[in-house]
Amino acid sequence: MPTLKAIREQKNLTQEELAEKSKISVRTIQRIESGTEPKGHTLRALAQALDIQQNLLQDTAVTDEVKIERKEEEQVQENINYSFIKIINLSSLLFVIVPPINILVPLLLLFKMKQRNSLARQIISVQILWTITAPIVFMLGIFLKPGAGLTLAFMIIIILSNIFIIIRNAAEIDRHKKLYYRLNFNMI
């Protein structure tokens, strides 16, 4: 818990002095300052020794964790080149009729453009999912034997759905720097 160290230093206490005042071992204080979460008696004793409220010690820890998470998110966002992400997304459009290539080309671009981030992985994951489900839907259309005209319509609808997904994601990347169609998991 990094805030314990900050509060201790603000009160001009050494770890040994805090240990003596709180009757908690120096080693336990060191562990807490390096990230171990204090509980129960230890938390109460430290709050009392530092003359602060127990929940203040907990709230500052949560605040620090949120700040750290935000910094990590900002660092990840700094590494994202949205122009490259858009190119990776739109590269699937060129090969929408040949499903395996609509995955391979964005995957190659991901490595060539050094955009190994969650956004690029999501784009490829969506294409993988579409590539898996499109033949299944097409086969169902064939097995139901609706006729040649309806089977052709199925194929066109399947291809148009992928085109729509790609274009909608490209528009969302432009507007909000995120994907409109995304999965809760990555396949790569």
Image (spheres, rainbow, N blue to C red):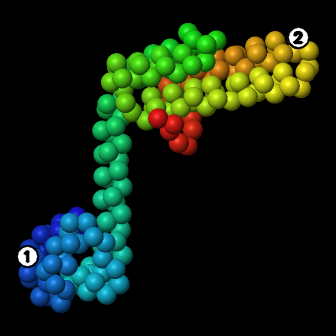
Q: Secondary structure at mark 2?
A: helix
Is residue 70 rendered to the left or right of residue 146?
left
Q: Is residue 3 above or below residue 46?
A: above
Residue bearing mark 1? 14
Is residue 60 rendered to the left or right of residue 182?
left
Rendered residue at 64%/12% (across/down): 97
Rendered residue at 30%/45% (across/down): 71
Residue bearing mark 2? 149
Rendered residue at 12%/88% (across/down): 20
Dot in front, 2 or 1: 2
Residue 55 location, quadrant = bottom left
Answer whether residue 187 is visible to the viewer in this image: yes
Residue 14 location, quadrant = bottom left
Count of picture labels: 2
| Cβ atoms under marks 2 and 1 closer than 8 Å | no
Mark 1 surroundings within 10 Å by alpha-carbon count, few (fewer than 14), some (14 through 19), many (20 or more): few
Between 107 and 52, the one lying in front of the other is 107
Amino acid identity at mark 2: Gly
- Residue 35 placed where, x, y %? 25, 66
Q: CA distance from mark 2 to mark 1?
A: 82 Å
- Residue 54 placed where, x, y %? 33, 79
Mark 2 surroundings within 10 Å by alpha-carbon count, few (fewer than 14), some (14 through 19), many (20 or more): few
In the image, farthest residue toward the right: 146
Q: Quadrant of the N terminus?
A: bottom left
